[in-house]
Each structure stands twice: as structure tokens, then as C-alpha cells.
């Protein structure tokens, strides 16, 4: 079976076609970074208008690249939330129109489940597995028992990790999105140069906190301690090392309470594109005898391949949606169990 996936929940207009035998037949992304760059973050109204302007050509290209026509698609999977509601509505309305016109099944996909299941497409990770979901808006550790069956072990009590990267980058006048810029500069920086806090490190449980770390970095910048290009690189390295220590500590706590039948740990979401963080988490997993998996870089940040794949997994279990489902700005993974 071949499923068309559509993703419009943030600032990527994306369409992809994936088959049941794990082939990515096409993967088209129209990134809007240039349109949001001047504002230092995503402007919801601009994003929604761009989705409207580009979605049709993005879908057409995904079909052309896969050498298919729309009528050859077996089902349409679309991000139904969580996300910026204007953008989600554009994707959902387009998907519903196509599904209705062609009489094809439609699957309302939770964007976070898309990130969560990508490692099952790329690395055939079996259920149950441990998931670290680290994106611009989410930061959670979950026990994934089965499709749609998520148990929350811990989450951020303030900012998400990606958000902290973006905000510190903004203070340093780096381009949006900040994560890749900080990772790049950190390569030539000294991570011991600036003393930064490791919020919640050593405390019981698996919750995260990044607000104090972000504020400490910002205060350093405002105090005039970060001036030269080398200073900036050193701050990036020091900040990234602090994030690493927090993630490592929380993962250790999660692993200590993970059942033995869990063999894999998956890191997903945009922050999973960070190679420095991946390396540190790989070492933790090795120490606990677990296999560490993070999707290929281009499938970590938002894309429609993950939506098509999550749609396929649901389609195989007969979990299709009726045409009257609602787009949702908020939609936690834990709500999936009951639909
Ligand atoms: O999953 P994603 O593409 O979009 C959301 O659903 O939020 O995640 C975007 C986030 C941004 O905060 C971005 O700065 C962060 O992922 N990110 C990174 C890296 N690449 C993207 N953070 C750290 N290091 C990276 N290399
Ligand atoms: Zn995402």
C-alpha cells in the first residue's frame, strides 16, 4: 500500500509518499525559513498563507517524484494537530477534499506520533520502546507500549529544549532556527568557558527544565560577557554541554525505571538532528545495554514522510478517520489511546 502524507503544522509545507514495504517514494518540503527569518521565529499568519500558496504544488511534486497519480494512492494521511491552527486547517481541508473526491480513506495523524514512529520506518524499532521527543514545542520522555499507547515518564516544566536553543540563538543574533546555528558554532567553542546551570540534574524523576539555563545564558549575554565571535562560540559550546548534561541525567533516570523488555531508545524531533547530543545519549544507552536510534537527519525535523508512515501504521490496524474530524491546536500523545 502507498500513502500520501501531508504536513502543514508549523513552517514546512510538506508532502511525501511512503509504501508499506518501507520505501520512501517521495519527500517534498517547501521550507519557509526565509519568510520568518526577519521576525526571529515563526509568524502563524504568514505560515498559514504560505501553506495555502504552496501546498498544491508540493503535493503535485510528491506524486511526480513517486511516478504516481493521485488516484493510485491508497490513503491520505494528514497532520491534524498539534500545531499552529491556521496551517493545520489548510492541510486538513486539502486532505479531506482529496479523500472525498477520490473516495479514499483518510487518517488524522498526530504530529508527535509522526516523530515518534519514524524510527520504526527507518530502523524497524519494535514496540515497546523508550522515546525522547525533543522538538521546538515538546520535550518529553515516554514509554511507547504500542501504536497509540504512550505512557509519560517526564516532560519539561517550562521551555522545550528546541525552544531554549532558539531563544539563546536569538539573543546571540543568530539566524532562526537556532539549533543548527548553535551546534555549528559550538564546534569551535570551549564548553568549559562559561559556567551555566543544569536545571533539575540529580533531582528525582524524568522532568526537564530549561528556562533557568536559557535565562542564565541570556544574562551573560546582556552583561556584556559575550562580545567576540570566539565568545559566542564558547557560549554556544557551554550552553550545548549544559543541555547535554540535563538530557543525559534524565535519560539515566528513565532507563532506571524502564522494563527489561524495552530494547531500544529512540531520540526524535528536531533536536534529534544534533550530533553532539546524539553521541552523548548513545553512550548512556550503551551503558544500559540498550540500542540507541535516531532517524536520519532529514527525517528528524518536520517532514511529511513521518506523517505518511504513521498513517500507514494506523491504516494497517484499520484505524482510519471519518471525514468530520477536527484540526486540533493541542493534542497530547496520551490522548491517542481513546481516539
Ligand atoms: O520537530 P521540529 O522540526 O519542529 C517542531 O515540531 O517543533 O523541531 C524544530 C526544533 C527547533 O527548535 C530547532 O532549533 C531544533 O528543533 N533543532 C535543533 C537542531 N536542528 C533543529 N536543535 C539543536 N540542534 C540541532 N542541530
Ligand atoms: Zn515537529
Image: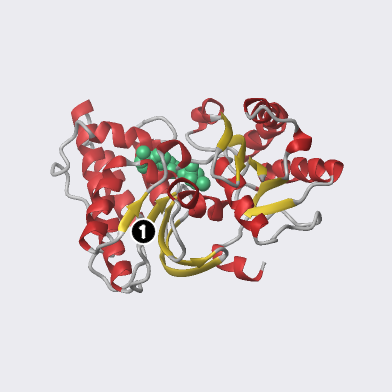
Name the residue nearer the viewer: 236 or 300.
Answer: 300
Residue beneath the point at 62% across and 34% down: 13
Say which quadrant the C terminus sits in.
bottom right
Residue beneath the point at 64% across and 53% down: 109
Q: What SS does tag 1 mark?
A: strand
In percent of width and height, residue 331 lies at 61, 60
Residue beneath the point at 61% across and 58% down: 330
Name the residue nearer the viewer: 45 or 292.
Answer: 292
Residue 91: image quadrant is top right
In percent of width and height, residue 323 lies at 81, 54
In the rendered image, the residue lying farthest to the front is 21
In percent of width and height, residue 18 lies at 60, 41
In percent of width and height, residue 36 lies at 54, 31
Residue beneath the point at 60% across and 47% down: 20
Mark 1 packing: few (<14 Cα in 10 Å), some, or many (20+)?
many
Residue 218 position (above or below residue 172): below
Residue at numbered disc 1: 265
Lateral position of residue 125 relative to residue 302, left or right: left
Residue 269 position (above or below residue 12): below
Lateral position of residue 160 relative to residue 91, left or right: left
Amino acid at each position: 500500500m502507498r500513502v500520501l502524507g501531508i504536513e502543514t503544522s508549523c513552517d514546512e509545507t510538506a508532502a511525501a509518499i511512503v509504501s508499506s514495504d518501507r520505501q520512501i517514494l517521495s519527500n517534498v518540503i517547501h521550507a519557509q525559513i526565509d519568510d520568518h527569518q526577519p521576525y526571529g521565529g515563526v509568524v502563524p499568519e504568514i505560515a498559514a498563507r504560505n501553506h495555502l500558496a504552496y501546498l498544491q504544488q508540493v503535493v503535485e511534486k510528491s506524486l511526480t517524484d513517486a511516478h504516481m497519480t493521485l488516484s493510485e494512492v491508497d490513503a491520505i494521511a494528514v497532520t491534524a494537530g498539534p500545531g499552529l491552527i491556521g496551517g493545520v486547517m489548510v492541510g486538513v481541508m486539502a486532505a479531506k477534499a482529496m479523500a472525498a473526491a477520490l473516495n479514499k480513506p483518510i487518517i488524522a495523524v498526530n504530529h508527535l506520533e509522526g516523530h515518534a514512529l519514524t524510527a520504526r520506518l527507518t530502523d524497524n524499532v519494535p514496540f515497546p520502546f523508550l522515546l525522547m521527543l525533543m522538538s521546538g514545542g515538546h520535550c518529553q520522555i515516554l514509554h511507547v507500549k504500542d501504536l497509540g499507547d504512550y505512557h509519560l515518564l517526564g516532560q519539561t516544566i517550562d521551555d522545550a529544549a528546541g525552544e531554549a536553543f532558539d531563544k539563546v540563538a536569538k539573543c546571540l543574533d543568530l539566524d532562526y532556527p537556532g539549533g543548527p546555528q548553535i551546534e555549528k558554532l559550538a564546534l569551535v567553542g570551549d564548553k568549559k568557558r562559561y559556567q551555566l546551570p543544569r536545571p533539575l540534574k540529580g533531582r528525582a524523576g524524568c522532568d526537564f527544565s530549561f528556562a533557568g539555563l536559557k535565562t542564565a545564558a541570556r544574562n551573560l549575554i546582556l552583561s556584556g560577557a559575550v562580545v567576540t565571535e570566539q565568545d559566542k562560540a564558547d557560549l554556544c559550546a557551554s550552553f550545548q554541554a549544559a543541555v547535554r548534561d540535563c538530557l543525559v541525567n534524565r535519560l539515566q533516570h528513565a532507563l532506571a525505571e524502564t522494563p527489561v523488555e524495552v530494547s531500544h531508545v529512540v531520540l526524535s524531533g528536531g533536536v534529534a538532528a544534533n550530533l553532539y547530543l546524539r553521541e552523548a545519549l548513545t553512550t548512556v544507552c550503551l551503558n544500559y545495554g540498550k540500542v540507541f536510534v535516531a532517524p536520519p537527519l532529514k527525517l528528524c525535523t518536520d517532514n511529511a514522510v513521518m506523517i505518511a508512515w504513521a498513517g500507514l501504521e494506523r491504516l494497517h490496524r484499520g484505524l482510519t478517520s471519518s471525514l468530520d474530524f477536527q484540526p486540533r491546536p493541542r493534542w497530547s500523545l496520551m490522548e491517542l489511546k481513546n481516539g
